[in-house]
Image (spheres, rainbow, N blue to C red):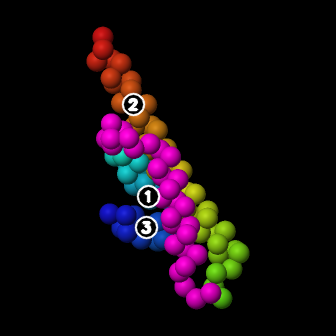
Amino acid sequence: MFLQLFELLMESLEDTRAVSVELREVGRLHVSLWQQGFRAAHFDVLVQSLLDATLKWGARPHRTQDCQAAWADICAFIVEELKDGFHTARKFSRRKASLKAF
């Protein structure tokens, strides 16, 4: 699933709306892991791993500062959308739980 999302992202760099919806959905799905200790901060580990991997891809001459900055922007976009979906779903689940208490 992640590779499919990444492929969609690469195809949608000019218009990220479609992949934004998909990334937020993935973030939303991670709320089900809250009880097992998953937190939005875990997405930061993902983005750091992505950044580390991008520094190893391709031939060294193509690893310019502009290229690295572009990858950093892409990775930041990914994690922001994942976190947005996660936090939105988390708020919804808390509201739903508080309504059940009545």
Q: At numbered mark 2, what does the secondary structure look like: helix, strand or loop? A: helix
Vertical order, 68 against 23 (above or below)? below
Q: Is 51 colored magenta in this rendering?
A: yes
Q: Is 33 colored magenta in this rendering?
A: yes
Q: Amino acid at mark 2?
A: Phe
Disc on the earlier residue, 3 or 1 = 3
Instruction: Give the residue at the far right of this rendering.
Output: 65
Label 2 Cα crowd, 10 Å radius (few <14 / some 14-19 / many 20+): few
Residues shaded magenta: 31-60
Q: Residue at x 48, y 58 (%)?
A: 46
- Where residue 25 sits in the image (x, y, percent)? 38, 49
- Where residue 90 sits in the image (x, y, percent)? 41, 34
**Quadrant where the image shows the C terminus:** top left
**Cα–Cα span, label 1 and label 2:** 22 Å
The residue under label 2 is 92
Residue 39 falls in image quadrant: top left
Indicate which disc residue 18 carries. Answer: 1
Q: Of residues 65 and 37, which is closer to you in this image?
A: 37
**Cα–Cα span, label 2 and label 3:** 27 Å
Q: At numbered mark 1, what does the secondary structure look like: helix, strand or loop? A: helix
Disc on the earlier residue, 2 or 3 = 3
**Quadrant where the image shows the N terminus:** bottom left
Q: Residue at x 61, y 62 (%)?
A: 73
Question: Closer to the camera: disc 3 or disc 1?
Answer: 3
The residue under label 3 is 6
